Structure formats: C-alpha cells, structure tokens
Image: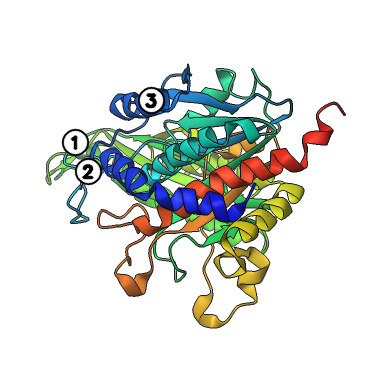
Amino acid sequence: MSPELLLKEANGLRETIVSDRRYLHSHPGTGFDIQDTVDFVKKQLTDMGYEPVDCGRAGLVALAGGKREGKVFLLRADMDALPMREESGEDFAAQNGRMHACGHDMHTAMLLGAARLLKQHEDEIEGTVKLMFQPAEEIFEGSHDMLDAGLLENPHVDKALMIHVMAGMPFSPGTVIVSPPGVTAPGADIFEIKVQGKGVHGSMPNMGIDPLNAAAHILIALQEIQTRELGLNERAVLTIGTMNAGTAPNVIPDSVVMGGSIRTFDEETRAFMKQRLTEIAEGTAHTFRASAEVTFKSGCPCLFNDKELSADALRYVKELLGTGNAYSAEELSAMSENKKVSGSAGSEDFAYISQEVPSIMLALAAGQPQKGYSYPQHHPMVRFDEAALTNGSAVYAYTAIRWLEEHKSETDL
C-alpha cells in the first residue's frame, strides 16, 4: 500500500468528508437517542456497497475486506453529542439544544471517509477491517453495550484503534500524537448523593433537619480524600458538578441531590475512592442528623494502550504523514516549551475494548489557538478545524491496512 496514494485519495474525498461532518454536526443526538445519525451513517455505508449491521441499542458494524484470509482490525468512531446549547457561531451549528462539543461528528465523518478508502482498496486488504460506529460514549455506556451484543466476534477482533480530535492544540491540523504504552485515559465513575433531611420553615431550622447544611459539609469533606488519603503517586480527581435543592429562599428543603464524578488511573485507587466517598457521605450526613444514599451510575475502566501496537501505529502514521506530522508522547516531552501539550484527564469508554483486545488511542490535532480555535472540548463555543479530517480518514485506513499486511503470516499461528 502506497502511503502517498492513500493520502492523495483521502484529500480527493475532502468535500465529501466535510459535507458528512457538517450534516452530522447539525443533527446531533445524545446517548442512545441518535436515530438521525444512525440512519445517515447506515445510508452512507450502504451506498458505498457495505452491509451495515445493527449492534446493540444504537451501534453499527460494517466489514471491509475479507476477500483474503487474515486477521481482523477494528476501527472505532463514536457518534453521540452532548446535552448543551451550541454557541460556536458556525453556519451549520446545531439548533436542537444538543451539540457535538467533543468532536464525535468529526470521528464519524472520518471513519466514513476511511470506509470509502477501504472500499477502493478492498481487494488488497490482507484480512478484515471491522468498522465500529458507537453511541453513548459521553455517558460511558455505548462501548459496553456493543461488546455485550457481540462486537468482538463474527469475525473475532485481533486489534483495535480509536482516534480522538483535540481542540486548542498548537500543532497544524491533522498532526497525530500516538499514545504511549500503558494507561493514558483514567477510569471514570459518575455518582449521585441524595441527602435526606426534614423540610421546615426557614425561620425554624431547629424544628427540621437541614440537608443543605449536611450536603455542604459533605462537599468539603470529600476533598480530603485527595489531600489526606492518597499517596503522592496516586492520581485522582473527585468533582461535585451539581447540587440541587429547594424552590424558595425561606424554606429548608427535604432533600438535596448532588452529582459528581471520580477519575482514577488504576483500579485499586478507583475502588478506594468509591469506598471512601460512600463512607464520608453517609458519616457526614449522620453527623448533621441527616442521611445520605450514594448511587454509582455509569462509568468505565482505565484505557490501556498496547505496547506493540503503539510502536506499530507510530511507524505507520510517520510513513503516511511524515515525521513532522506524527509524534510519540516521548517525542513531545522532548520538544521546546512552545510545543508542549498538557495531557488530558478525560475518560474514554473505548477503555472497555482496550480491556478485551490490544488497542491504541491516537490524538488528532484539530484546531490551533493562534488561529482562533481557542475553546476546549465540551465548551459551547468550541470549534474544530476541518482541515484535519482527511488526515484522520487516511490514518484510520492506512493503519488498519498496514497492520493486517504485516501480520498476515500469523493467521494460522
């Protein structure tokens, strides 16, 4: 496979990939409620000659290649948006109170572009490329749902790759950063704490039990886990993001509902944080005569990058894009100050797949601050540079083709 040819073909698809991205961006759905997106992706794949198959509640799978015996390489794109109103100012901005503020529309459009490239070279694929279009990444449920539906079988997946666009990076759009071996995205747990008190008139607090007072003390007490109960190398973040109670300023409410998240980089710390959160919430509430119930909702484990696949992917993207447009994490750390990029603490439910098969996560630069792309992911004004799209499609396709080509002799081992 000629990297020059594939990159040229990807650039030739630019208008189509951009058009796909803009449609997806202007028609966002959240969680598993993404039927418009699913219908669009299914139609595009069908028109290309694929036979997409439903997988789980709102996922799609399609197969490229399979004409030659070989291994199976999975490429993943997530399709869901966030429940927030868009303020990006783009002509194609969403109007339905939802927004692709994390770039999943970019991912889906890039994988559709890769599907077109793979179809053009289907006779050359030494094995099978499995295309995974996933819902509900933002709530950490879509990947697990597709796994339960048999994602990794029929045919059995040997390796897996995901790409995530990154806004606000100082690199030219389309630059790729290959994750190092090991954990690069923390495990996450979303939780809710319901503090139950006893409502009463605001002038008579002694006659009731103030759940807001208890909740305030719980919020402060939870911060002590990080500062006093974790070691120097035990990285974790605990955030309370919502606290809802009451409807009137002169009434002490019956209850308070707090919502938050935990991020950790190993399963032992994750379990400890969950245990102590529950103990502190319940104990603190009891101190103030209230009670607390902790419920853990969605979550995901740590994302683990395979050592060999990390090295292979770095070699492939440098072949494709050149050394000035592809970097390892080690190379980034050795670069000058103005090129340093701070790591992300965002979790990623591709982690469920990385726990099952050797996997790799790639970051794709998609917006330089000095060119007006200064807002971060999940901000209502975030914008992504569409100049990154063709590189993303080419990286998806080329990495899968090259890995299958290099490992075809292992098929019967």
Residue shown at 37% from the left, 50% from the top: 14
Dot 1: what SS? strand
Q: Horizontally, is 341 left or right of 57 in the view?
A: right
Q: Of label 2 and label 3, which has the lower sequence position?
A: 3
C-alpha distance separating marks 1 and 3? 63 Å
Type of amino acid at the residue the image marks with label 2: Pro
Q: Name the residue under label 3.
A: 47
Q: Mark 1 points at which residue?
A: 200
Count of all numbered marks drawn on residues in the image: 3
Residue shown at 47% from the left, 60% from the top: 174
Instruction: Compare residues 318 and 217 and report the one nearer the observer.
Output: 318
Quadrant of the image containing the C terminus: top right
Quarter where residue 340 is shown: bottom right
- The scheme the figure's colours follow is rainbow
Q: Horizontally, is 81 left or right of 66 in the view?
A: left
Q: Of label 1 and label 3, which has the lower sequence position?
A: 3
Residue 21 in picture, x, y percent from top left: 32, 44
Instruction: Compare residues 352 and 27 and report the one nearer the observer.
Output: 27
Q: Do the residues labelled 2 and 1 touch (CB within 8 Å)?
A: yes
Few, some or many residues within 10 Å of mark 2 (<14, 14–19, 20+):
some
Q: Name the residue under label 2.
A: 205
Type of amino acid at the residue the image marks with label 1: Val
Residue 236 in picture, x, y percent from top left: 57, 54
